[in-house]
Amino acid sequence: MAPRTNGRGVQVEDTKICVVMVGLPARGKSYIAQKAQRYLQWLSIDAKTFNVGNYRRTDAPQPSADFFDIGNTEGERRRRAAAEAAIADMLAWFKQGGVIGILDATNSTKERRKWVMDVCTREGIEVLFVESKCDNEEMIMANIRDVKTTSPDYKGQDPEKAALDFRNRIKNYEKVYKTIDGDGDESDYTYLKIMDVGSQVIINRIQDYLQSRVVYYLMNLHIRPRSVWLSRHGESLYNLNGKIGGDADLSPRGHQYAQKLPELVRQSVGGDRPLTVWTSTLKRTIATARFLPENYNQLQWKALDELDAGLCDGMTYQEIKDQYPEDFIARDEDKYNYRYRGGESYRDVVIRLEPIIMELERSEDILIVTHQAILRCIYAYFMKKDQAKSPWMNVPLHCLIKLTPRAYGTDEERWQADIPAVSTWRAKGSTAKHEDPTGTA
Ligand SMILES: O=P(O)(O)OC[C@H]1O[C@@](CO)(OP(=O)(O)O)[C@@H](O)[C@@H]1O
């Protein structure tokens, strides 16, 4: 589409994209859809998933596998009606300003894909097909296990019967399923085809920046089991004094935490499996990671440095309130968007963390030793915390957090080191140097 100007002569993007999932059931389409939605929302790009199955489920009781047979005309009529309803809602959502709509369905025939393509093109919406093609039995089985325990279609049913029914449903789809093969009309389509969860990918006719961002992200996803460990640095001398920013050394208790960290990590890993360690380039995170075993690879990232407080760097919250009272109030009113004079906002931090998230998605087990604001942003990505709340989250010092991504969410465990530290958490409106977030002192 032609770019629009915003009145000040600056070109603004007017792209709207419908990401159309393609593939047989149990190929991880919903997983891909929800990951893409989360990634985009975290980057403040308005994205929403429209799951056709949910529309089908609202109008009738749970059907059996026969319902999905191509010869079942009533089934076909209802499945088509569900797709129409989902698309109608998506188009209405685009009109209200939505940017990336994700149509989560099998879209397994060329006819169905052409229909979606025509409807979207008429409305000026770009279409990006994302096909997950997988013949890996192990992965399909894992997905079936997951579906039969989590899908609303099989709620309360005998798991064995559910698995059998689901397998029959897949067989019915297999009768009509056509992969996007670049033949005929489809050779002009924009698509990403992911084979066996990333072992091979095919990309066709990617048109613009936003599409390429989505495609690059999806290419980096994997579903091998792994965890991400997060820790703040040990208590610093600045933390003790209630000062923000800076590049201070650890306090004596901070050093104790550094000595304790290898044991905490070993406990949470459940063995001697080495992790890769990422720190910031600031002294307090590097010092915190220095006793970790030598076979742990360590890497310093500038992108993991603490939120830059600009002119306020090195001040206490009380000093900021005294010297920049308006800024102090503005930050409390909208902490996510407030940008320190000459420094950064949480929104800025998310943008600079994007390559970290991309690299995390590509990687296996990683331990990140970083700072309060940075940890909040990374945590928010995995745990789907919204922007208004995440900058106010309490992330205690001397605590190791383990996040384990699963098919439909992320599990969290915490290990608190038995080493006291000040609290750097601050309530809205307060300038207290150290507060107790639980209120129990
Ligand atoms: O956004 P707020 O809540 O002010 O928290 C960020 C602050 O956390 C601090 C501690 O108060 O980070 P750090 O973990 O690096 O010590 C400050 O340096 C930083 O400005």
Image (cartoon, grey):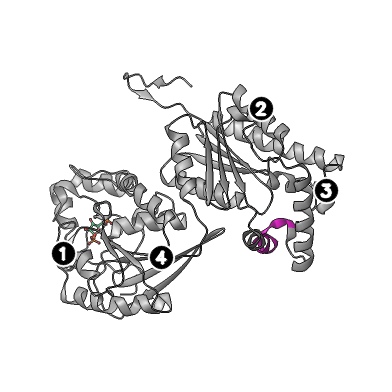
Q: Say what amino acid the circle numbered 2 marks.
A: Gly
Place of residue 95 in the rendered image (x, y in percent of width and height, measured from the top left): 55, 28
- Number of other residues with Cα within 10 Å of mark 1, as a class: few under 14, some 14 to 19, many 20 or more: some
Q: Nearer the viewer, mark 1 or mark 4?
A: 4
Above or below: residue 313 compared with residue 103 = below
Above or below: residue 12 compared with residue 396 = above
Quarter holding ligand 1 = bottom left
Query: CA gap, disc 1 to disc 4?
Result: 31 Å
What numbered label is drawn on residue 184? 2
The residue labelled by disc 4 is 365
Q: Quadrant of residue 114?
A: top right
Q: Answer with left or right where residue 68 lies relative to residue 139.
A: right
Q: Earlier in the sequence, mark 3 or mark 2?
A: 3
Does mark 1 have its CB less than 8 Å from ligand 1? yes
Residue ID at (73%, 62%): 155
Query: CA gap, disc 4 to disc 3?
Result: 42 Å
Q: Nearer the viewer, mark 1 or mark 2?
A: 2
The residue labelled by disc 3 is 67
Place of residue 196 in the rendered image (x, y in percent of width and height, measured from the top left): 58, 53
Identify which residue, 113 or 250, lies in the foreground: 113
Q: Which residues are magenta?
A: 144-153
Q: Say what amino acid the circle numbered 4 marks.
A: Asp
Q: Quadrant of residue 378?
A: bottom left
Prevailing secondary structure class for the magenta stretch in the rendered image: helix
Query: CA gap, disc 1 to disc 2?
Result: 65 Å
Q: Earlier in the sequence, mark 4 or mark 2?
A: 2
Q: Say what amino acid the circle numbered 3 marks.
A: Phe
Query: CA gap, disc 4 to disc 2?
Result: 43 Å
Q: Say what amino acid the circle numbered 1 marks.
A: Tyr
The residue labelled by disc 1 is 238
- 116 is within the stretch colored magenta: no
Does mark 2 have its CB less than 8 Å from ligand 1? no
